[in-house]
Amino acid sequence: MASAFWCIVEDDRAGRPKKVTGEVLGEAARLARQLGGQAEAVWLTDKATDEGLKQLAEWGAARVWLLENPALAPYRGEVWTPALAELATQHGVQAIFGAVTARQRELLARLAARIGVGLSADSVAFSLQDGKLVATRPVYAGKLLSKVTWSKPPWLATLRPNVFRLEDPKTGATPQVERPAVAIPQGTMTLAERKEEASTGLPELAEADIVVSGGRGMKGPENFAILEELAKVVGAAVGASRAAVDAGWRPHRFQIGQTGRTISPKLYLGFGISGAIQHLAGMRTSKIIVAVNKDPEAPIFKVADFGIVGDLFEVAPLLTQEFKRLLEK
Ligand SMILES: Cc1cc2nc3c(=O)[nH]c(=O)nc-3n(C[C@H](O)[C@H](O)[C@H](O)COP(=O)(O)OP(=O)(O)OC[C@H]3O[C@@H](n4cnc5c(N)ncnc54)[C@H](O)[C@@H]3O)c2cc1C
């Protein structure tokens, strides 16, 4: 279909698409409708599941292009990119969207280079002007928003998680599944060993609706237990500033900011974080920002919706207690 907006599926490696794919499909469907087109999912995987396919249809995928092959796992850019490029070229697609996740950032950049089109990375809004897509993306660590457009299709973009709305679920929708014949190239690298860190039992940082984050003011790794306690009560993920990560208190995958993860939760609570521009680059699009800092002049208060000037070691346990009381009601 000429005005098809393709959305690359991000899954949990067990056949379940992640919520961020629903957000990407939601935005793609809204845009495609204005051009008389539709949102479609493209799923590259070694094992799809019926529930996964159904989920994609409920999120608004009018069609699912399924490339299911053992050679597609684990993700390798040199294997996925040619397969996806061949499929996109065969079908004259209008747009290809992905999420701002580690692998889709890389995949979409590779794809843009391979098919010779532009990519709007880390997009936070879209509009259609005279039938052409215009994307908004933050630049200079979020200080400015720039608007970009494409000189030719397909329009490639990655979308920041937690910014775009899911469509109302199309309960009971069944997907139209296509299994196209596409050559899957041999990988030049094979996986020697995979080590997965033990799950924290808390939501994934980029996808969490609530993020509790700690900085140098936490004073040591052991004190992050205070934030984990609060996170458990409110169902949050725990993040950190670079100062806390550089000190070895948290692994790098929990770092928020310019050289870490970009998050847009509904609620961000920062404890002992000064609010350096590089940290703000990763969280300033959060819907509500709460900052706890003992220094009333800390720059984070300039972007905070609510600020508490105080000692985090007193404030955090009080907040935990209060949330517990409220949520148990
Ligand atoms: C190229 C580059 C990239 C960078 N990328 C990132 C990035 O991705 N993410 C990032 O976070 N930073 C990044 N930085 C580093 C950034 O500039 C800051 O140094 C860092 O964010 C500071 O972390 P912080 O706020 O935890 O520490 P600090 O700036 O030291 O702030 C600690 C705060 O804790 C408060 N505090 C102390 N004790 C308490 C207490 N008991 N109760 C309440 N408050 C207390 C203090 O008042 C202070 O405001 C980058 C820097 C560069 C140059």
Image: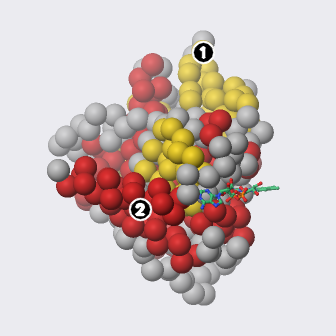
Query: How many other residues sit within 10 Å of disc 1, few (<14), some (14-19) or many (≥20)?
Result: few
In this view, the residue in front, 141 or 14, is 141
Query: Residue 186 falls in which quadrant of the image?
Result: bottom right
Q: Quadrant of ligand 1?
A: bottom right
- Residue highlighted by disc 1: 129
Colouring: secondary structure
| Disc with the residue nearer the chain's start (2 vs 1) | 1
- Amino acid marked by disc 2: Pro
| Label 2 secondary element | helix
Residue 202 visible somewhere in the drawing:
no
Tell me where residue 216 appears, x and y as whole percent.
67, 64
Quarter of the image with the N terminus is: top left
Q: Residue at x 27, y 42 (%)?
A: 58
Tell me where residue 168 appears, x and y as whole percent.
28, 34
- Residue highlighted by disc 2: 317
Q: Residue at x 45, y 80 (%)?
A: 198
Q: Residue at x 33, y 47 (%)?
A: 56
Query: How many other residues sit within 10 Å of disc 2, few (<14), some (14-19) or many (≥20)?
Result: some
Tell me where residue 326 appears, x and y as whole percent.
25, 49
Tell me where residue 271 appears, x and y as whole percent.
56, 56
